[in-house]
Image (cartoon, helix red, strand yellow):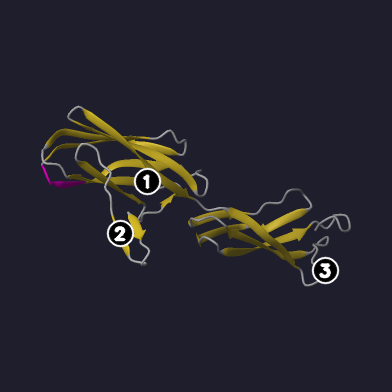
Amino acid sequence: KFLVTDNDNLTNTRTLYFNSYGLLVNHQVVSGNDTVIEYGETGYISLTICNIGTQAYNQVNFSISTPDPYITITDPTAYLGSIGANQTITLTDAFSFNVSPDIPDKHDFVITLYAYAQGHSFQRLINLRGHAPVYCLKGLILEDGDNGMLDAGETANLLITYQNTGSAGSSLIQMEVAAAGESVTVNSGSFQIPQFLPDSLITVAASITGSPGAPFEYIF
């Protein structure tokens, strides 16, 4: 689409369609329940094919591929068959792909669409982006009502705050707090987070106890 403005500040817009052999092909991507491609989801690509020419096309086939390590194509081919002049056909969920649970946040990837019709072929790049959560530790606060340090034999709550700085949310997150040595005992450190939205904070309170025999100021 081009927008042109002349010296009198008058504007006009025109849409130019790029096609091959009279076929205009558009794509739509759905992943999960929306158009946002997120980690661990299955994505579907639908095609809308419009024959803007004056002749019919037979034996029309499509396929997709990608070299991206975070994307696995699970349904790579689609068969249209014939399409008449000035006819529009939609292939719903023509292709499918799986998104790796380990895809980095805002990871750009390319799927190549190939079209074959009556001895002719062309290809188009479909540029997409994957989204994932990113967990960052934002703070540790010891609620001991005293000096903010865990003394020998003392029990207190350790407040642990995380932030999701990624562009995708997550749900049913299992969080475990474990002691790194024998100087601290974790009394309660298992948590399940129902939902963790992008750019949000969560805080959990783990009950911990300092060993009675720990050296002074050894535990912080």
As drawn, the label of residue 199 is: none
Q: Amino acid at mark 1?
A: Thr
- Check the image and name the residue furthest to the top: 119
The stretch in magenta equals 85-90
Query: Residue 162 falls in which quadrant of the image?
Result: bottom right
Residue 147 got which mark?
A: 3
Q: Is residue 42 magenta?
A: no
Towards the viewer: 179 or 76: 76
Establish if 83 lies above or below 146: above
Residue flagged by tag 3: what amino acid is it? Asn
Is label 1 in a helix, a strand or a loop? strand
Marks 3, 2: nearer the viewer = 2
Nearer to us in this view, 151 or 29: 29
Tag 1: Cα neighbours inside 10 Å, few (<14), some, or many (≥20)? Answer: many
Q: Earlier in the sequence, mark 2 or mark 1?
A: 2
| Residue 141 relative to residue 62: left or right | right
From mark 1 to mark 3, how far is it between C-alphas?
Answer: 51 Å
Front of the two marks 2 and 1? 2
Q: Nearer the viewer, residue 55 or 180?
A: 55
Residue 70 relative to residue 163: left or right: left
The crowd level at tag 3 (other Cα within 10 Å; few <14, some 14-19, many 20+) is few
| Residue drawn 25% across the image and 41% down it | 19
The label nearer to you, 1 versus 3, is 1
Would residue 188 be visible to someone looking at this image?
Answer: no
Instruction: Kindly check if marks 2 and 1 are in contact, taking CB atoms under 8 A apart as contact.
Output: no
Q: Is residue 218 left or right of residue 66?
A: right
**Disc 3 element:** loop
Residue 57 percent across, percent down from the top left? 14, 36
The residue indicated by pointer 2 is 13
Count the labels in the image. Answer: 3
Q: Which percent across, then down, holds residue 16?
A: 28, 49
Structural crowding at the residue carrying mark 2, measured as other residues with C-alpha within 10 Å and reported as few (<14), some (14–19) or many (≥20): few
